[in-house]
Image (cartoon, coloured by chain):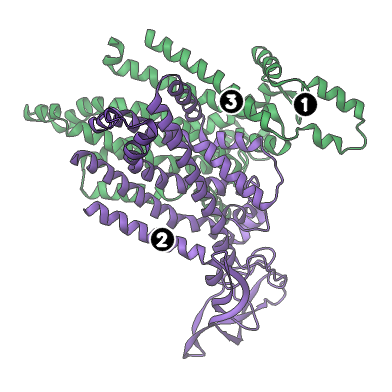
Amino acid sequence: MRYLARRLAQAALLLLGVSILTFLFSALAPGNYLDDMRLNPQISAATLAALRAQYDLDRPLPLRYARWMNSVAHGELGYSFAYNSPVAPLLWMRARNTLLLTLTAMLLAWALALPLGIWSAEKRGGLPDRAVSLATATLMVVPDLVLALGLLILAARSGWFPTGGMVSVDFAELSSAGKFRDLALHMALPVAALVLSALPTLVRHIRAAVGDALTAPFLRAAMAHGISRRKLLYRYALRAAANPLISLFGFSVGALLSGSLIVEIVMSWPGLGPLLLEAILARDLYVVIGGVLFSTVFLVCGNFLADMLLYWADPRIRAR
Amino acid sequence: MMQRRRIVRWVVALFVLHAAVACAGFLAPYDPVQQDREHVYSAPMRIHFVEHGRMRLRPFFYAQRLREGSYNLFEEDTERAIPVDFLVTGAPYRLLGLVVCRRHLFGVQGARLYLLGSDGFGRDQLSRILYGGQLSLLSGLLGAACTVFFSALIGTLAGFYGGWRDALLMRLAELFLALPWLYLLFALRAFLPLSVSPTKAFLLVVVVLAAVGWARPARLVRGVVLSVKERDFVRAARGFGAGDAYLVRHHILPETRSVLLTQSAILVPQFVLAEMTLSFLGLGIPEPVPSWGNLLGILQQYSVLVSYWWMYLPALAIVPFFVGYQGLANALHEDEATAKIDG
């Protein structure tokens, strides 16, 4: 338990560090949201000054940070200039969609990568192994932006899938089965893009980890004892390979989050990605900081989950 | 020895690819910003060798005419065959950015040839892809060079001196590694000026890339430095009275070379892609200067995406570079591994 508590404390420190870092970046920013307002002749200088005071734009950085931390404690994460509302509810609405997308993609990617990786590790050097290697090598050289745009063009020209958004216009009038179908159809394209870009790395690492376990001396000994291949693979080799795979799981969360940022924007999925882009273009400071922080929270959660799994799977860590 | 040969092969392949982009002025038939409002969104044209059943020595193409009753669809006018000339004089350009030159690999007279189609302003897509690669690749290469330099500096500082410097720098590196890297890239870009001149935007992209990418290589360098500084030959040199600067330059930095080489082979394509992503979203190099990213930006318009598939071609230009750099990174990595086993 001490291990998990230490990990939790590390995660909290990390989040604190990230928030300080993004605040420091924001100090570099030339100009702010109010600059555009200044060009508007209908807004008086007095109003602008009042707004500056209200948003603390004149105060020194440490004070702004303290104010912001206070608003974090109240669950607001600062104030959005463009939306004229606290940042947290705004982000949460979009983050749900991002989570829906990435979690689905994650489940699918692992569900595909595990059997593929194990299969090619077991038949190392054989035809299936070479086929899988070729496929992963091909996918590796197609970056996610290129892949997402390609899929979008394919969908637009064939008309098989809707090419943007999360639901159809008449979503509210559909039956619940119809709603599910509609959502699934809209999700198909972005999820496919994410899965295909995550798959090659996963398969390669799984193949390597399982392959290492299969050639380990203890497994040769087990083989010499006449234990069946199936039992060897699933009972012993997989268990030995679990440790690197769980670490890989934590890593894949970060890769998927980065991938989903660009895929969401390309496929206009109403997640954190488009919101973040809008906020950057509008200089909506706290939304940018909040968006980065949210993504870090997800990543930290993923890593913590991996740590817990490790704790459960690896007795060496529990003994420490 | 096998590994060495593989490395050389990948380096040669990459050199050819980069040379093609560097000599864009010669290979491209037109200036990348020259417009032709008569031929907007012209589809890629076909090169023919057979005219009316007769084989011709010189490749030619048919002039385009508007399809009957249409204002934006073109078809081949089989009455007007226009030959393709080689090594023609055309629009002036600077070869490798230095020598003013007018000679192009191929060109035509009396019409414009769009091998890969034209864009919404009638600009030649092939020329724009070739020229666009110059900025994209240069930002990737420069960004990687900066990153490698700073990560070598930081990693050596942390590993060699240890203590509070090590703790501070490595905690900072962990912070940078903890963020999903695209979010980090966005966050950095968010707080820098939005609308700037192409040159400034290019430098901005390079700086942002270097600031995002330094953490991983710096940690790897630190690891190497930590192990090297305890080796006997370093201790011996120190015993003979070598100073810190001498030790670092002659004994420690040479040992980090293979790690840094592998890392740069990994970083360059990643950075080129990052430049593409930024410019694609309008956060990088602005129009009318072509870069692979802003060439793709037009695809955000649905009508273009559906109707003009050749606007997607710039995306594919990066794929051979990815193949080359990944092959090189793998070969370097294996070389590193065998070197470790050998001694």
Quarter of image, res B157: top left
Disc 1: host chain: A
Horizontal and vertical percent position of residue B147: 48, 41
- Image quadrant in which the N terminus of chain A is located: top left
Determine whether the residue tagged by mark 1 lies in a helix, strand or loop.
loop
Residue at position x 30%, y 15% in the image = A317
Provide the letter of the chain coloured purple.
Answer: B
Q: Residues within 10 Å of mark 2 (few under 14, many from 20)?
A: few
Q: Please give the residue where the numbered disc 3 appears in the rendered image.
A: A21
Q: Is residue A31 above or below residue A299?
A: below
In this rendering, which labeled residue sits more in front, label 1 or label 2?
A: 2
| Residue found farthest to the front | B241
Q: Amino acid at mark 1?
A: Asn
Q: Colour of chain A?
A: green
Marks 3 and 1 belong to one chain: yes
Q: Are marks 1 and 2 on the same chain?
A: no
Query: Which residue does the image show at 41% across and 19% down from the upper left?
Result: B163
Task: Please state which amino acid type lies under the numbered disc 3.
Answer: Leu
Q: Which residue is mark 2?
A: B15
**Left-right relation of B64 to B223:** right
Q: Quadrant of the C terminus of chain A?
A: top left
Looking at the rendered image, the disc whose residue lies closer to the viewer, 3 or 1, is 3
Q: Which residue is mark 1?
A: A84
The part of the image, by quadrant, that contains residue B188 is: top right
Q: Residues within 10 Å of mark 3 (few under 14, many from 20)?
A: some
* Identity of the residue drawn at 15% across and 33% down: A229
Which chain is mark 2 on? B
Residue B32: image location, x then y, percent? 63, 66
